[in-house]
Image: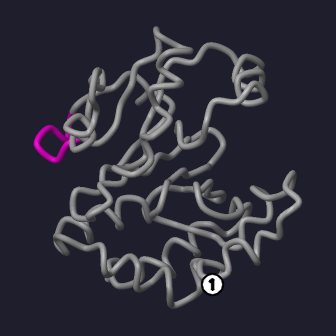
């Protein structure tokens, strides 16, 4: 997910990992740096929620996540499953890498404070994010955030259950520390209203 600026350090790490084939916006908010990545990796396929295309000025996504075409194949399906959250205002897409038992999301699961993300900063992750610090799977703030962003409970229930059925142990989120163990339990706790 291209959610942060493309720094030299990030570029070096990506080059260590190999060819960049896909550039993804995890939801309608996490696209601001996508063009930087597209310029640096012009052969990579850009994908994101269809609502983003309307926000882009001088270019368009190569492919979109959409409730209108849920069976679209993007090319990564042999390794990675995905679930588009059409019932949520954020239009999130969650991903599941089967080999590493890792799920990835943007805002569907948060795990504040962001200790890891501030590890190279002189600022405290708690002080700079004091309003969000309680936003984690076992806190009431994330629970209410999920509910407030609901636009279609039937769709959201189906989508939350899809993720709950994946066999993941770890969850990488854009906000807060990676959940290294018991991530599926964290998902079930945060999304409990949709898993009956």
Residue 68 occupies quadrant:
top left
Pick out the residue farthest to the left. 68
Residue at 58 percent across and 79 percent down: it is: 135
Query: In this figure, which residue is indicated by the disc labeled 1?
Result: 134
In the displayed structure image, the side of residue 114 where residue 47 appears, left or right: left
Residue 168 occupies quadrant:
bottom right
- The quadrant in which the C terminus is found is bottom left
Q: Position of residue 79 (x, y in %)?
A: 51, 31
Please give the range of residues in magenta. Answer: 65-71
Q: Is residue 183 magenta?
A: no
Comparing 49 with 189, the one in front is: 49
Q: Position of residue 155 (x, y in %)?
A: 19, 65
Residue at 76 percent across and 76 percent down: it is: 126
- Find numbered disc 1 in the image and state the secondary structure of the residue it sits on: loop
Pick out the residue farthest to the bottom. 140
In the displayed structure image, the side of residue 173 where residue 107 appears, left or right: left
In the displayed structure image, the side of residue 3 where residue 75 appears, left or right: left
Q: Position of residue 115 (x, y in %)?
A: 79, 65
Structural crowding at the residue carrying mark 1, measured as other residues with C-alpha within 10 Å and reported as few (<14), some (14–19) or many (≥20)? some
Which secondary structure type mostly characterizes the magenta part of the structure? loop
Pick out the residue farthest to the top. 43
Comparing 64 with 128, the one in front is: 128
Vertical placement of residue 47 versus 27, above or below: above
Comparing 77 with 50, the one in front is: 50
Residue at 34 percent across and 85 percent down: it is: 193
Vertical placement of residue 67 versus 144, above or below: above
In the displayed structure image, the side of residue 11 where residue 97 appears, left or right: left
Residue at 36 percent across and 54 percent down: it is: 92
Q: Position of residue 67 (x, y in %)?
A: 16, 47
């Amino acid at each position: 997910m291209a959610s942060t600026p493309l720094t030299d350090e990030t570029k070096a790490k990506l080059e260590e990992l190999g060819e960049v084939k896909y550039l993804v916006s995890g939801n309608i908010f996490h696209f601001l740096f996508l063009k930087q990545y597209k310029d640096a990796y012009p052969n990579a396929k850009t994908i994101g929620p269809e609502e983003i295309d309307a926000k882009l000025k001088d270019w368009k996504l190569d492919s979109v996540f959409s409730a209108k075409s849920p069976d679209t194949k993007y090319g990564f399906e042999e390794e990675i499953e995905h679930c588009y959250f059409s019932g949520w205002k954020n239009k999130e897409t969650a991903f599941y890498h089967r080999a590493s038992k890792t799920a990835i999301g943007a805002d569907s699961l948060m795990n504040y404070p962001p200790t890891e993300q501030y590890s190279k900063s002189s600022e405290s992750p708690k002080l700079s994010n004091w309003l969000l610090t309680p936003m984690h799977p076992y806190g009431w703030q994330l629970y209410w955030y999920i509910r407030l962003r609901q636009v279609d409970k039937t769709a959201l229930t189906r989508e939350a259950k899809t993720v709950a059925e994946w066999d993941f142990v770890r969850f990488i989120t854009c906000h807060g520390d990676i959940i290294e163990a018991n991530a599926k339990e964290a998902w079930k706790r945060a999304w409990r209203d949709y898993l009956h």
